Amino acid sequence: MKQLFAVLLCAFLFVSAASAQNSAYHFVKGKEYKYLIEQTSMQMQEVNGQTSTANSEVTMSVVYTLLETLESGNLKMQATIENALMINESDNGTQTLGSDMSGKSVIFEMTGRGQVVDVDSSIRKIDSEGIGLLIGATSIFPRLDGSKLSDGNSWSSTESDTTGEGESSIIEETERNYEIKGKKSVNGIDCFEIALVSEADREGKMVRGDQELIVNGTRNGKATIMYGIEEGVIVKFDAEINTDQTIVVPSNNMRVPITATQTVKIELITK
């Protein structure tokens, strides 16, 4: 479950690399941007005719700071958790994580369009079961093309992304449709209201010890993005994501259907 939060937050957030002139994010160097992040997840899977469920709830506040704008135009960012709580409920009981994550931080690099391209490897030295919360915190910013951000505009994108490490690799083909609905004021900030609809097909494999698992499925979702026009940052983000996939264990041909629904809410709570 440690990596669940990072995976879920990434549901809408993949996109290909972009040049600096298409940047949507314009953080002020050294300024602190605090976000409240809330997520719920409900998952159901079936194994050998038995159905099991798992629910999780995450609440945390994270401070983001731009450390440096690199020559490539990419942004070197730091994310620091102020407080965090993750509650996992399953057939095996309840697990609570995050109480020891306060003050822990990670440095990461992302493009001006929001794609995370590198996470400082020192994060691996943090001794905590809640480390997945910090990893997930690096990927909260939805991917946006700055050149498309004008009132009334709509556009589509299709991307292919690969996630995983080592022998594990999952490829996700995603089509996204964006539409700017108009302008609204959110917490005193003038924003574009952007509707996002996403449809994705995913396939690949996960390796667990000496066992290989084959993954196939779909992920669909809808989101509303409130983008600060002058500030160049996300002010609010609300999404609902539905996943339907099957994991196959080739060694015994066992099939495990999994369905999940996630909600994600992100809000800037400092200007």
Image (tube, rainbow, N blue to C red):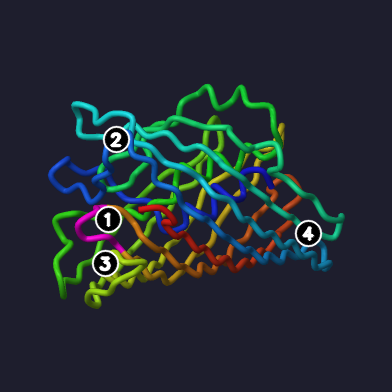
Q: Quadrant of residue 216?
A: bottom right
Q: Are marks 1 and 2 in contact (CB under 8 Å)?
A: no
Label 2 environment density (alpha carbons within 10 Å; few <14, some 14–19, many ≥20): many
* Spot occupied by residue 265 in the image (x, y as percentages of width and height): 50, 63
Start-end of magenta stretch:
227-232
Q: Secondary structure at mark 3?
A: strand
Earlier-in-chain disc, 3 versus 1: 1
Give the vertical position of 134 relative to 7 (above or below).
above
The label nearer to you, 4 versus 2, is 2
* Spot occupied by residue 180 in the image (x, y as percentages of width and height): 23, 72
Label 3 environment density (alpha carbons within 10 Å; few <14, some 14–19, many ≥20): many
Q: Quadrant of residue 210?
A: top right
C-alpha distance separating marks 1 and 4: 34 Å
C-alpha distance separating marks 3 and 2: 22 Å
Residue pointed to by mark 3: 191
Label 4 environment density (alpha carbons within 10 Å; few <14, some 14–19, many ≥20): some
- The residue type indicated by label 3 comes to Cys
Give the vertical position of 82 relative to 175 (above or below).
above
Query: Residue drawn 69% across and 32% down?
Result: 128
Query: Residue drawn 59% across and 25% down?
Result: 124
Earlier-in-chain disc, 1 versus 4: 4
Query: Residue drawn 71% across and 42% down?
Result: 99
**Looking at the rendered structure, which numbered label has been put on residue 75?**
2
- The answer to which of 150 and 262 lies nearer the viewer is 150
Main SS of the magenta part reads loop
Earlier-in-chain disc, 4 versus 2: 2
- The residue type indicated by label 2 comes to Leu
C-alpha distance separating marks 1 and 2: 14 Å
- The residue type indicated by label 4 comes to Glu
In magenta segment, residue 230: yes
Indicate left or right for 34 with 178 as reference. Answer: right
Earlier-in-chain disc, 3 versus 2: 2
